[in-house]
Image: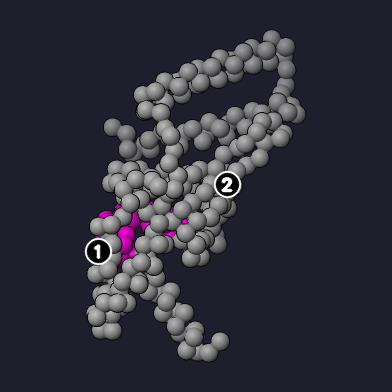
């Protein structure tokens, strides 16, 4: 590859990053979401759709000196995904659509299904660059042309999900369903405690595995509890 080709590739990448920056600026995307968006774009390497496990994506967010464990990496992704989605829903702007991963099956036969992502923002950036290069202002200032194109594109961004359209129950209905399920779970756990106490049992083997799975499930649910700084 010639030096000229290398320079062209670097220039293309720089312009793409500038297009991403300008579209985020044009829609007033909070800076707190930028790192998560950058990691998704970096993993996709130009693709607008892909699957990836939360643990894998969380690991990509680590710096070389990080000591984050697998569970912390997974939680980091879930927290940041929730923050991005909250902002998108509140502003009716969808830069990224996703479908969170889940466990399919029960017992030892379950399989982990990765999260799925669709990056509209990659499409927007490519459209912005195409429009910017047609602008007479491009030769004088590519960054200026990109900014102008981004401002125009910001007026034509999807306002509702079109790739993943989850059929959600109403909030009140969902809240009641969750309350019922948590009550049932608490009852069953209390019965398990009674059995252990009455028989002076020490948990081992599969019972320990089940207990650890319950702890992880509770941590997943805790992601939906507001952060302390947001309370009051």
- Residue that lies at the very extreme toward the top in this rendered image: 198
The quadrant of the image that shows the N terminus is: bottom right
Q: Is residue 9 above or below residue 52?
A: below
Q: Is 91 contained in the magenta span?
A: no
| Tag 2 near tag 1, CB within 8 Å | no
Magenta span: chief secondary structure: helix
> Badge 2: few (under 14), some or many (20 or more) residues near its Cα, within 10 Å?
some
Q: CA distance from mark 2 to mark 1?
A: 35 Å
Label 2: which secondary element: loop
Query: Residue visible at 37% across and 28% down?
Result: 170
Q: Nearer the viewer, mark 2 or mark 1?
A: 1
Label 1: which secondary element: helix
Q: Is 33 contained in the magenta span?
A: yes
Please tell me which residue lies in front, 24 or 155: 155
Q: Is residue 170 above or below residue 73?
A: above
Q: Which mark is residue 114?
A: 2
Is residue 67 at least partly visible in the picture? no
- Residue that lies at the very extreme toward the right in this rendered image: 205
Is residue 209 at least partly visible in the picture? yes
User: In the displayed structure, does residue 128 sit left or right of residue 137?
Assistant: right
Q: Residue 169: x percent and y percent?
A: 41, 28
Q: Is residue 158 above or below residue 153?
A: above
The quadrant of the image that shows the C terminus is: top left
The first of marks 2 and 1 along the sequence is 2
Query: Residue visible at 72% across and 34% down?
Result: 108
Residue to which mark 1 is pinned: 152
How many marks the image carries: the answer is: 2
Question: Range of the magenta residues?
Answer: 21-40
Colour pattern of the rendering: one colour
Query: Residue visible at 42% across and 62% down?
Result: 122
Query: Residue visible at 45% across and 79% down?
Result: 10
């Amino acid at each position: 590859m010639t030096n000229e080709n290398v320079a062209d590739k670097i220039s293309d990448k720089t312009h793409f990053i500038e297009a991403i920056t300008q579209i985020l600026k044009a829609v007033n995307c909070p800076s707190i979401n930028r790192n998560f968006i950058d990691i998704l774009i970096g993993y996709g390497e130009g693709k607008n759709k892909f699957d990836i496990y939360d643990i894998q994506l969380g690991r990509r967010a680590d710096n070389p000196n990080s000591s984050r464990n697998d569970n912390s990496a997974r939680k980091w992704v879930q927290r940041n995904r929730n923050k991005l989605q909250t902002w998108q829903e509140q502003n009716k702007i969808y830069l990224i659509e996703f479908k969170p991963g889940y466990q399919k099956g029960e017992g030892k036969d379950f399989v982990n299904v990765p999260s799925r992502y669709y990056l509209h923002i990659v499409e927007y950036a490519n459209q912005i660059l195409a429009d910017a290069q047609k602008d007479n202002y491009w030769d004088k200032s590519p960054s200026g042309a990109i900014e102008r194109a981004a401002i125009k594109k910001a007026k034509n961004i999807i306002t509702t999900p079109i790739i993943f359209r989850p059929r959600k129950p109403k909030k009140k209905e969902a809240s009641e369903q969750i309350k019922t399920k948590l009550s049932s779970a608490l009852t069953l756990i209390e019965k398990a405690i009674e059995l252990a106490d009455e028989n002076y049992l020490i948990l081992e083997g599969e019972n320990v595995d089940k207990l650890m799975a319950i702890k992880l499930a509770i941590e997943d649910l805790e992601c939906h509890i507001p952060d302390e700084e947001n309370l009051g």
